[in-house]
Image (tube, rainbow, N blue to C red):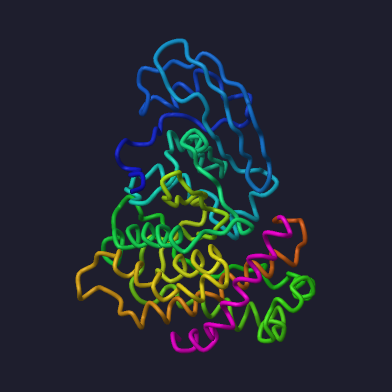
Amino acid sequence: MGRDAGVRPVTAAVVVPSDWSEITPEWLTAALATHHPGAVVDAVEVAMRDDGTNRRARLAVTYSSGSGPATVFVKAVDPDHRAMIEMTSGLLHEPRLFASNVELPLEHPLVYAAPIDEAAKDFMLVMEDLTARGADPRDATRPLTPDQAADGVFGLARMHGRYWGTRLERPELEWLEPFVPWDGMQYAPLPAALDRLGDDAPASVHALTIDELVEDVWKPYVRTLTTGPSTLLHGDAHVGNTYLMPDGTVGFLDWQVARRGNFGLDLGYFLQGAVTTADRRAHERELLEVYRDALDLPTDEMPSADEVWLRYRASAAHGLTLWLCTASAGELWQRPDIALALAQRYSAAYDDLHTREAIADLM
């Protein structure tokens, strides 16, 4: 299951182009050289472009000799959003992760090149076009089934177990920062989100002010992520950053928020948003067991079932805060139907799982 980023090293000897026009056949030939050493690119054409907080494009590629992918996907920072991404996500974390060539033992996109310009705070990722493998990108309006979610938690557990505790301490990951709170969430117009949720949000969520949500729920929870054993976190493993392969394997996209921290963040943020509320309530206990069994850790390092449950309960604070703030912004950050669906699921999880009590137990 999954792709191993360390099988072949990501190409490093290419510079970051400052504009799409600088993605020339020569540049792309160099970017593909490690994985397709005999390929010489003849022509590159932008087949699709989507500029948001990041710039993304699908490139159609032809070759004068050798062979390579017919299309590739490229991703770069949008200069207008550089400061916001740097504050909330970590501007260069995703390219650093793939340039490090560490193994990621779960399904993820194959990255051909990840050049970084540290001085300019710029990067570009050249990766496979997942549609060529039949990948089906998912979002909150198309949730996963419990069986599909089980594959997702299995993959996260394999990655977490691989980098659990002292296994995370390796030179190629020295840059990896701890997951800590950031500022700015307190400016979200929370009443707008609660009005949109209406009766779909429980009374415990409607009672929250933005200051209480951020200062008394979210920040205290995030501070618990630096307690206990740390691991490599995807950091943003909500369903909108997943895709489903034809064989049922769940893959993870957009590793921009990669961090070190407690496993509960990825586990809860993924599971509580990836399935419907009814499916979560019916299956979450067994899915947590799937996760724990797949960690493959020695007995003395294995978290107890009670610890997994406690960390999972507390993690609803993160999804609740991020998606209430996102839903409060209307169409600014996300499609309203997606934001509302996730805000509903994390609100229900927050209430069902007594998240504030769980956070207090961790502090």
Q: Is residue 357 covered in magenta?
A: yes
Magenta region, main secondary structure: helix
Q: How many marks?
A: 0
Identify the residue at image location x=70%, y=56%. 333
Residue 59, image x and y in percent? 57, 27
Task: Name the quarter where the C terminus is drawn.
Answer: bottom left
Position above or below: 108 against 193 = above
Tell whether 256 sits left or right of 344. left
221 relative to 360, above or below: above
Q: Is residue 57 left or right of residue 242?
A: right
Residue at 45 percent of width and 45 percent of height: 245
Q: Identify the residue at horizontal 55%, vertical 86% (top origin).
A: 356
**Seen from this angle, which residue lies furthest top?**
64
The magenta span reads 335-363
Magenta segment includes 187: no
Closer to the camera, 298 or 124? 298
Depth check, front residue: 140 or 180 = 140
Quarter of the view holding residue 86: bottom right
> Could you tell me which residue is drawn at 29 percent across and 55 percent down?
170
Q: Tell me: residue 356, above or below residue 276.
A: below
x, y percent for residue 21? 63, 24
Residue 136 location in percent, x, y? 53, 45
Pinpoint residue 284: horizontal percent, then vertical percent: 45, 73
